[in-house]
Amino acid sequence: MSQSTIIIRSDGPVLQVINNNPGSKNSLSAGFIDGFIELLENIDPSLDKGRVIILSGAEGFFCSGGNLDGLKKRSQSAYDQRRGTVDKINKMILLMRACPLPIIAAVEGGAAGAGVGLALACDMIYAAEEAFFMAAYVKIGITPDGGMTPFMAEAIPRWLIAQMVFTGDKMPVKRLYELGVVNEVTPKGEAVAAAIKMAERLANGPAQALAMGKALIGSARLSPLRAQLEDEAHIVATALGSADAREGITAFLEKRAPKFA
C-alpha cells in the first residue's frame, strides 16, 4: 500500500513506514496520516505476528510537524475545522500505542512540532547524532499537540519541558539520549540501518510476550499499583502457558537459542 506522501515497504519481518513529503521536510499530510491510520487499523496479530514497524522520514528528515500553509488556512476557520486535523493526529497516536507490534522511530535531521509527538509515540527511538527535537509551536503562537507533553512528562523534568515549550529551541538528541528518551545515537545517515538491526532482533523474539509487554508499559504510569500488579499477574500467567514460554524455558535449560514460532 502506498500514497504520494506515505511509502510502506515490507521486507520480511520489517515493515518500513516512510513519511514521504520532503518538500516540506516531511510535514504531516492528510495522505500520511490517513495511510498510517489505515495500516494500523488493519494490523492482525495472528497474520502480522513477529513483525516490527520502523517509522522514518524521506530524504534525511523525520518530520517537521504541521504544514504551515494548512495551519494558516485553518487559523481562519471555525473551531471544529481547526480541531479536525488534531483529532486525526490523536487517533493515529492512540493507534500507535495500541498496536501490538513494536514501533521504532528512525530519526534523521530532526523532529519538530507534532513530529516530536510522532517520534515519542514509538516504542524505541534511534536518532542520528546531528538530529534535534524541537517543540516549535511557540514560534508561531500555538501550543503542543500530538502527545508531546504527556510523552515528554514520562521521561524528562518539568523544567526542561518548559524550556522546550516556552522557547521552541532545538534540543540535541545527545541530551535526550542522556535522559533516556533516545535509545541509541548513530552516525549521520545510519539511524534507519540501526533501527532495522534492532527490528530484526525483536522479530526473532516471542511476539506475544512483546505485545503483552508493550501493553503493560503503556498502562504502568496510569494504573494504581494494585491494578498494575493484577495486570502483571494475569498477563504473566497467560504468557507462561504459551508455546513461546515453553520453548523459551526449555531452550534456556538446554543452553541453546530459542526458536519462537
Image (cartoon, rainbow, N blue to C red):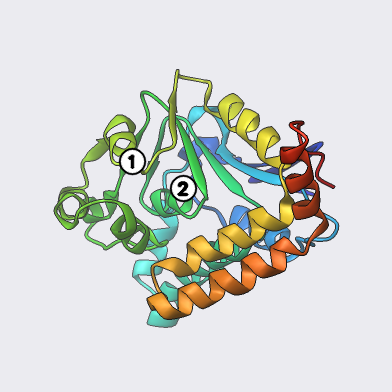
Nearer to me, 84 or 261: 261
Q: Earlier in the sequence, mark 2 or mark 1?
A: 2
* In this picture, residue 192 sits left or right of residue 246: left
Label 2 close to label 1 by CB (< 8 Å): yes
Residue at image x 42%, y 54%? 117
* In this picture, residue 162 sits left or right of residue 202: left
Inspect the image, locate mark 2, and give the three-letter code of the amino acid beneath it: Ala
Q: Position of residue 46 (x, y in %)?
A: 84, 60
Query: How would you rate the neighbour count of disc 2 (Cα within 10 Å): few for under 14, some for 14-19, many for 20 or more?
Result: many
Q: Residue furthest top?
A: 187
Q: Establish if 162 lies above or below 131.
A: below
Q: Position of residue 125 (x, y in %)?
A: 48, 40
Helix, strand or loop for disc 2: helix
Note whether residue 155 is visible. yes
Q: Position of residue 246 (x, y in %)?
A: 79, 53
Query: How would you rate the neighbour count of disc 1 (Cα within 10 Å): few for under 14, some for 14-19, many for 20 or more?
Result: many
Nearer to me, 205 or 150: 205
Residue at image x 28%, y 55%? 137
Residue bearing mark 2: 119
Cα distance between the residues tagged 2 and 1: 9 Å
Residue bearing mark 1: 133
